[in-house]
Image (cartoon, grey):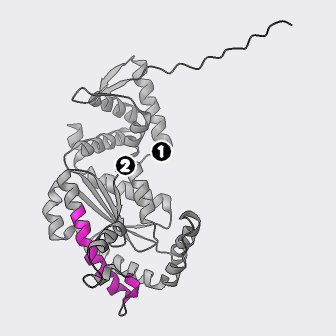
Amino acid sequence: MPSRRRAVTSSPVAPDPIWVEDRRGTGLPYSKGLMAASIMATGLGPGRAYELAARIEDELRSRRVERISADELASTAARVLARDEGPQVAEMYLAWRWAKRSSRPIVVLIGGATGVGKSTVATKLAARLDLPRVIPTDAVRQVMRTFLPPDEAPEIHRSSFEDPSSPVLGFVDQASRVASGVIGLIERAVTERFDLIVEGVHLVPGLSGDPRVRRVSSEAVIIEVLLVVQDPAVHRAHFLNRLENEHGRSPGRYLRRFSEIRRVQDHLIELARRTGTPIVDVGNLDSAIQSVVDLVVSQVTAGGVEAAAG
């Protein structure tokens, strides 16, 4: 029988990496994923941001660039963005990059009543803006419960809805106790210069006005936002959704306390209006996430467009 030769297929050869050097001369290969993450801070979605990151790589390869400084890469990215998306997007990209490279950490405080979607928004915000540290106030409360016995701090050892006088008063007592731990987190973030997102029901609007926070506010960008769900039917549906997406955690406990949760939300809305804290409705999750992204980017880059351009 005639011998049969097995066809040999060769894998496509990956192009050589483009090395991006920082100011110390340390180099890392160009990453479309990292570039896309930076571009998403302008408000563009992940798909479009990745497409633009690929175009930036194509631009570099067309110029036969093998090594490039981080600053030169940013200038190239800005030119591609200005050409394909407009000068405003390019300016926002440069301003966000300038803000991230500054010595002032970014601290985002996301409050809201139970079940409005705080953890979901915080997680998406962290991914969109490369703010990797997300800490829930429930974790702060749990740590405090470890060190403070029930007879010393009964408000953190029970549900705020168990207050015999009023669920709102129970919530206020618990939130005020947990706030001391949250403020400690903020102080640590400022001292050690790292970005931070804190999310949780215990974040009462106006926390940035606390004297301890005000003392460090000039050394950081501290942003507060209150998430709400105005439509009760949509709010109730959030709890039912947990049954499918959170390992079968029963929503029954929350639904039984739904009227109390709504009263806590009304209290938070009143405080937000009084303190000028931005309010974002999570009736539509995608638009809410975009609103929070826009809010954070606009506050972080306030004044940064001119600084970046200069």
Q: Amino acid at mark 2?
A: Leu
- The single residue placed furthest to the left in the displayed view is 215
Which part of the image, by quadrant, shows the C terminus? top left
Viewer-proximal residue among 291 and 191: 191
Q: What residue did someone put label 1 on? A: 46
Number of numbered discs present? Answer: 2
Disc 2 crowd rating (10 Å Cα; few below 14, some 14-19, many 20+) is many
Look at the image and give the residue range highlighted in magenta: 159-185
Magenta segment, prevailing SS (helix, strand or loop): helix
- Whole-percent x and y of residue 102? 21, 44
- Whole-percent x and y of residue 53? 43, 34
Drawn side of residue 203 relative to residue 180, left or right: right
Q: Amino acid at mark 1?
A: Pro
Image height check: is 103 above or below 206?
above
**Quarter location, residue 152:** bottom left
Which part of the image, by quadrant, shows the N terminus? top right
* Marked residue nearer the N-terminal end (2 or 1): 1
Residue visible at 34% across and 77% down in the picture: 268
- The single residue placed furthest to the right in the displayed view is 1
Disc 1 crowd rating (10 Å Cα; few below 14, some 14-19, many 20+) is some
- Tell me the CA gap for discs 2 and 1: 11 Å
Drawn side of residue 33 relative to residue 215, left or right: right
Q: What residue did someone put label 2 on? A: 129
Under tag 1, what secondary structure?
Answer: helix
Task: Check residue 305 for magenta coloring.
Answer: no
Viewer-proximal residue among 211 and 6: 6
